[in-house]
Amino acid sequence: MSPSMQQFARRFVLMSPVTVFEYPVWIGTIASSTLNSLACLGDVIGVMREALAAHASQTQRLENQDEWQTLSDLSGGDFVGRLLADYEMFTRYEINI
């Protein structure tokens, strides 16, 4: 790429607006008022359930290990419930990079 083309590309990229979607994994650590976007997951909820089930050590107790904690134990099941809800909440904003 020629130097002038590199300069043009750098300028274009540096001045391009980008939409950022922040996904709050630990919702208790942020103010819920910053969540300003919803995404409907209806078409992909089955895929999300399969992906979560693939992490057996986090979703199933080990045999004869009653003290083994799973994701369902977090927040009385609310954590998994939020992962598998029909909608996900995000904080959406624009930045120029």
Image: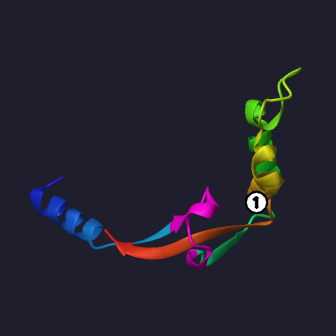
Kindly identify the residue that appears in the image at 18 percent across and 52 percent down: 1
Q: Position of residue 56 (x, y in %)?
A: 78, 32
Q: Position of residue 18 (x, y in %)?
A: 41, 70
Residue at the farthest right position: 64
- Residue 68 falls left or right of residue 36: right
- Residue 21 falls left or right of residue 2: right
Q: Quadrant of residue 33?
A: bottom right
Residue at the farthest top position: 64
Up-down relation of residue 18 to residue 6 (above or below): below
Q: Secondary structure at mark 1?
A: helix
In the image, is residue 88 part of the stretch drawn in magenta? no
Q: Position of residue 47 (x, y in %)?
A: 78, 49
Specify start and end residues of the magenta stretch as a single range.
21-34
- Looking at numbered disc 1 in the image, what kind of residue is underneath it? Arg
* Residue 23 in view in this figure: no
Kindly identify the residue that appears in the image at 80 percent across and 43 percent down: 50
Q: Which residue is mark 1?
A: 82
Q: Position of residue 79 (x, y in %)?
A: 75, 54
